[in-house]
Structure formats: structure tokens, C-alpha cells
């Protein structure tokens, strides 16, 4: 492999999510990246409340949870068509093992369904389950960071 290409790939994988979007041409890939980015932002909102970094705000917590649920519902539509882009971190297993991918999406939905947000303690108790559901899918269907 040419050194310049190696460097470009290394930088690509290390880039932040925002940088990772630069130059993505495929609209389907861009849409699913945005959906995932929203999930990341929503989880951060909940995590910061759970840890007392930001003040507990039940309306904000509910909005973040609703958004996570809505984005999870979008996963089949966003990832259904096999679309690729050099910047994408999606692995081919999404399309060679659609049942497994769908199962990870269902687990995610179940974790969110079980999440209670009436106190920071409630949220904290759910964070591990939610995070595990995100990781369970990323471990198999997303290029390792
Ligand atoms: C059913 C599988 C699945 C679940 C569940 C899932 N993800 Fe992802 N996620 C992916 C895949 C696949 C990608 C890579 C998409 C691409 O680059 O084309 C990704 C990418 C991301 C990215 C990078 C997006 C970007 O900017 O390019 C973030 C952030 C992310 N996920 C956060 C989360 C969070 C937080 C959760 C849980 C609340 C979650 N994901 C749950 C499959 C999943």
C-alpha cells in the first residue's frame, strides 16, 4: 500500500464524527451517519444528566429518549439499501447478515423501552444497558475505531 494512502486511511479512522462526514457523497450513507450522530448526541445528553454534569431536566431527558427511539425505528430504512462510501464505517455484514443486524436493532429498541427518566438515578441505571446495545451492534457491524 502506498504510504500516502496508508496515512489517509489512518487519519480517516481516527477522525472525529464531524470530520468523518466531510466529502461523503452518497446521500444514503450521509443520512445514516446523521441518524447515528443524533443517537450519539442524545446519549450524551442523558449521560451528562446521569452523572450530574448538567442539571436534571425531565423534559430534556424525555426528548432525548424519544429521539433515540425514533432514530432506532429509522435504522431499517437508513441501512436497508446497501450503500457505500469510502468514509463509511459500515461493515458488509449488515447486508450479508440482515437478521443479525435487525436483532441488534430490536435489542436497542427494547433497551430504550425499558429506560426510565424520572430522576438522574433512573437514567444512570439504564445507561449501561443502552450503551451495551449500541456497542453490541457496533462490534459486529461497524469498523472498529
Ligand atoms: C443496529 C446497529 C446499530 C445500533 C443499535 C447503533 N448503531 Fe451506531 N452505527 C452503526 C453503524 C453500522 C455505523 C456506521 C455507519 C456508517 O459509517 O455508514 C454506526 C455509526 C455510529 C456513529 C458514527 C456516526 C458518524 O458520525 O459517522 C455514532 C456516533 C454512533 N453510531 C452512535 C450510536 C449510539 C450512541 C448508539 C446507541 C444509542 C448506536 N450508535 C446504536 C450501527 C448501530
Image: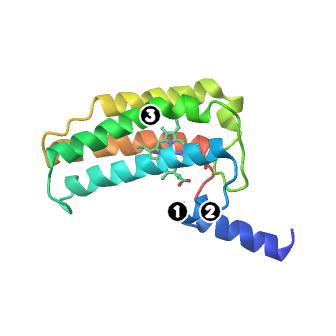
Residue 126 drawn at (x, y percent): 27, 41
Residue 130 location, quadrant: top left
Circle 1 residues within 10 Å: few <14, some 14–19, many ≥20:
few
SS class, disc 1 = helix
Any mark on residue 22, and which? Answer: 2
Residue sitting at x 57%, y 65%: 19
Q: Is residue 19 left or right of residue 48?
A: right
Looking at the image, residue 37 lies above or below residue 15: above
Tell me what residue is drawn at x 66 percent, y 65 percent.
12
Q: Earlier in the sequence, mark 1 or mark 3?
A: 1
The image quadrant where one finds the N terminus is bottom right
Q: Left or right: where does residue 131 sit relative to residue 58?
A: right
Mark 1 and mark 3 residues within 8 Å of each other at the beta carbon: no
Kindly identify which residue carries mark 1: 18
Residue 42, percent across and down? 35, 48
Tally of numbered tags: 3
Element on which disc 3 rests: helix
**How far is disc 2 from disc 3 in space, using C-alphas?**
24 Å
What separation in Å lies between label 1 and label 3 (alpha carbons)?
20 Å
User: For mark 3, what is the residue?
Assistant: 72
SS of the residue at dot 2? loop
The answer to whether residue 126 is visible is no
Amino acid at each position: 500500500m502506498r504510504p500516502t494512502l496508508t496515512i489517509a486511511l489512518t487519519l480517516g479512522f481516527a477522525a472525529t464524527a464531524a470530520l468523518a462526514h466531510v466529502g461523503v457523497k452518497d446521500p444514503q450513507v450521509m443520512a445514516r451517519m446523521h441518524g447515528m450522530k443524533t443517537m450519539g448526541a442524545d446519549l450524551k445528553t442523558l449521560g451528562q444528566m446521569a452523572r450530574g454534569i448538567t442539571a436534571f431536566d425531565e423534559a430534556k431527558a424525555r426528548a432525548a429518549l424519544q429521539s433515540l427511539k425514533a432514530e432506532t425505528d429509522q435504522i431499517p430504512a437508513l441501512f436497508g439499501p446497501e450503500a457505500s462510501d469510502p468514509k463509511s464505517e459500515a461493515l458488509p455484514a449488515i447486508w450479508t447478515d440482515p437478521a443479525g443486524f435487525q436483532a441488534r436493532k430490536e435489542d436497542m429498541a427494547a433497551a430504550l423501552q425499558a429506560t426510565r427518566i424520572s430522576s438522574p438515578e433512573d437514567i444512570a441505571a439504564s445507561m449501561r444497558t443502552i450503551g451495551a446495545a449500541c456497542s453490541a451492534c457496533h462490534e459486529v457491524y461497524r469498523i472498529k475505531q
